[in-house]
């Protein structure tokens, strides 16, 4: 629970707005974000590194809604993007190109050209092939590409296997003992300036010694590179800091510990620091609200069937994620151990399992911590339209993405002309 999303007078509120009032207007399911929570969390993260030469580049993949990005742009945030689409989103929200880094293992030639044309801060390179491609494109365009190389420090962040990126045997980055050769190669290539290293070891990390180990390796690497005559003037630490999912994790303590580790390794290194938090900024600034359609007691289990499903919030089934489930209006009924499941025709379609919950048909449930990797990961499986997103601001709220209509969903497809002649009975 946090100060921006909490019970007040017997109803779950985001800032000054009852979630039930939003549901009455936009229907369910929907995502709701607290503007104050996003600002508060960005400020806390920013302030933890304020004494370093640091830029906070919000990882758009966590939440790419233009309202969220505009809020963060106005707070001074930069952006970490991984596609031309995300780059265009960041620019459209008013984030200056010189505050944008482009990460990702598979940038296309078109994406690189677009990023160079816009003059972004840095491209984070992940392979020799990409390095050569960028050099060729930059030469053709007559510009110099600012680069860093992503280092895979081979450290186990002890998070979910699908959130682990900093171990060898994953597709990410280049091995840290190959970095010297990589810099030497880059030094021979035209129109590239490789003067930084970056990393991202995984996501939802609450085991902070993993950062300690990874950062230690990076500092060693900087010393080796400098001793060999290379300039290393910026250091991008990626994202990954974990959040609380109703499990008692103390986020403020986690941030303080993370900041201490960062300071200990990098304060004296003379590098500009870039950080790419995603989840920490928006996860606990958002909720996913769904309505109970049916109560379904069976011999084995008690199911609460809701109108939200895996296509709307895939984290439980994809990452075994545990989102806290709270009734929007708590009842005094006896809690029943239940699985909260959606209408999608797959056994993997569940939002939560084995939760003690008192609710009934028509009640609203809120899945907490849904402001990161929620709406962005949603799809239209089972021809379920994309849900609405709203942003609360004090006692006001706005729809920041309307619910997709079924008509619009169908209209995305086109039927080839040769099929438009009507039934000819030939089969
Ligand atoms: N930088 C890079 C290069 C990344 O790949 C990521 C996340 C971030 C920053 C931000 O990490 P964060 O601070 O949010 O942990 N869909 C998954 C999370 C995937 C994270 C992928 N990379 C989930 O729902 O848990």
Image (cartoon, rainbow, N blue to C red):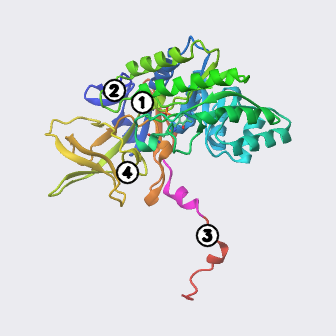
| In-front residue for pair 117/105 | 105
Q: Nearer the viewer, mark 3 or mark 4?
A: 4
Q: Earlier in the sequence, mark 2 or mark 4?
A: 2
Which of the two labelled residues, at mark 2 and mark 1, occupies the earlier sequence position? 1
Question: How far across and how far down the image is residue 312, in percent?
Answer: 43, 48
Q: Is mark 2 on a helix, strand or loop?
A: loop
Q: Is residue 412 left or right of residue 332?
A: right
Q: Do the residues labelled 2 and 1 touch (CB within 8 Å)?
A: yes
Circle 3/circle 1 CB separation < 8 Å: no
Residue 38 % position (x, y): 48, 26
In the rendered image, which residue does mark 4 sit on? 309
Residue 10 vs 175, above or below: the answer is above
Q: How far apart are marks 2 and 1 (CA)?
A: 9 Å
Residue placed under numbered mark 1 in the picture: 242
In the rendered structure, which segment of residues is drawn in magenta?
403-413
> Could you say whether the residue bearing mark 3 is in a helix, strand or loop?
loop
- Label 4 neighbour load within 10 Å: few <14, some 14-19, many 20+: many
Give coordinates of residue 164: x percent, y percent.
46, 40
Residue in the image at 65% along x and 23% along y? 234
Cα separation between marks 4 and 1: 24 Å
Mark 4 or 1 closer to N-term?
1
**Which residue is found at the position 48% from the left and 36% from the top?**
202
- Give the quarter of the figure containing the N terminus: top left
Mark 1 CB within 8 Å of ligand 1: yes
Instruction: In the rendered structure, find residue 415 and report the number of the disc placed on it.
Output: 3
Q: Name the residue under label 2.
A: 249
Residue in the picture at 45% in, 47% down = 387
- State yes or no: residue 409 in magenta: yes
């Amino acid at each position: 629970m946090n100060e921006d999303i909490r019970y007040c007078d017997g109803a779950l509120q985001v800032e000054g707005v009852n979630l039930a009032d939003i549901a009455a207007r936009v229907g369910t399911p929907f995502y709701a974000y607290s503007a104050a929570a996003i600002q508060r969390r960005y400020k806390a993260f920013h302030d933890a590194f304020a004494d370093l030469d640091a830029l906070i580049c919000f990882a758009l993949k966590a939440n790419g809604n233009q309202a969220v990005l505009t809020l963060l742009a106005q707070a001074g945030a930069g952006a970490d993007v991984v596609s031309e689409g995300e780059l265009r989103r960041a620019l459209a929200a008013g984030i200056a190109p010189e505050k944008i880094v482009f990460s990702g293992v598979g940038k296309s030639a078109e994406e690189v050209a677009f990023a160079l044309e816009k003059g972004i801060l840095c491209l984070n390179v992940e392979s020799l092939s990409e390095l050569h491609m960028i050099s060729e494109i930059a030469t053709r365009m007559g510009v110099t590409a600012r680069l860093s190389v992503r280092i895979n420090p081979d450290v186990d962040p002890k998070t979910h296997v699908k959130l682990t990126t900093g171990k060898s045997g994953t597709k990410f980055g280049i091995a840290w003992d190959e970095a010297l050769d990589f810099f030497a190669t880059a030094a021979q290539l035209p129109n590239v300036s490789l003067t930084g290293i970056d990393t991202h070891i995984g996501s939802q990390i609450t085991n902070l010694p993993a950062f300690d180990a990874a950062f230690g390796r990076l500092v060693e690497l900087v010393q080796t590179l400098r001793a060999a005559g290379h300039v290393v003037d910026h250091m991008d630490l990626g994202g990954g800091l974990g959040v609380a999912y109703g499990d008692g994790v103390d986020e403020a303590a986690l941030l303080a510990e993370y900041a201490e580790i960062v300071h200990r390794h990098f304060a004296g290194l003379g590098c500009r620091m870039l950080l790419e938090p995603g989840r920490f900024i928006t996860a606990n600034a958002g909720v996913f609200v769904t309505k109970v359609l049916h109560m379904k007691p069976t011999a084995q289990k008690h199911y609460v069937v809701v109108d939200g499903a895996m296509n709307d919030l895939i984290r439980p089934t994809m990452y075994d994620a545990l989102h806290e489930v709270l009734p929007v209006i708590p009842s005094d009924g006896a809690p029943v151990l239940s699985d909260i499941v959606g209408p999608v025709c797959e056994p993997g379609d569940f939002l939560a399992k084995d939760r003690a919950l008192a609710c009934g048909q028509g009640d609203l449930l809120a899945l907490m911590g849904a402001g990161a990797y929620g709406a962005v990961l949603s799809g239209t499986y089972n021809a379920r339209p994309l849900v609405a997103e709203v942003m609360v601001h004090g006692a006001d709220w706005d729809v920041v993405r309307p619910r997709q209509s079924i008509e619009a969903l169908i209209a995305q497809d086109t039927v080839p002309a040769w099929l438009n002649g009507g039934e000819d009975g030939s089969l």
